[in-house]
Image: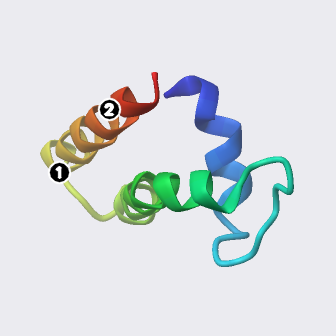
Amino acid sequence: LCRYRSFYHKINNLKGEYPYPDLSPKLLAELDPLIDLILQRNALAAERSKAERERMDRLIRRYDRKFD
């Protein structure tokens, strides 16, 4: 997950645009559910309990394994 961290950080404010011409639209479409999970987790981090953050982290890790 760490190797994607800067990508997620950059895409945080660019979602819906096409910020990375070197990434294919197909790859971005495949990453979209993972990006959504991360954005949800980040947006809710301050409001949610530790258990909820850990649940979101597990979902993110499970999805991330598909790209290893």
Residue at the far left: name it: 51
Front residue of 61 and 31? 31
Q: Residue 61 at what x, y percent from top left? A: 32, 32
- Residue 40, given in percent of the width and then of the height, sits at 38, 64
- At 30% from the left and 65% from the top, the residue drawn is 47
Secondary element at tag 2? helix
Count neighbours of disc 1 (C-alpha within 10 A) and say few if under 14, some if 14 to 19, many if 20 or more.
some
* Callout in the foreground (1, 2): 2
Q: Name the residue under label 1.
A: 52
Residue pushed farthest top?
68
Q: Which of marks 1 and 2 is nearer the N terminus?
A: 1
Q: Give the residue type at disc 1.
A: Glu
Residue that numbered label 2 is attached to: 61
At a point 86% along the width and 56% down the height, the residue shown is 21
| Above or below, comparing residue 4 to residue 50 in the picture | above
Residue type, label 2: Arg
Q: Quadrant of residue 3?
A: top right
Residue at (65, 78) in percent of width and height: 16
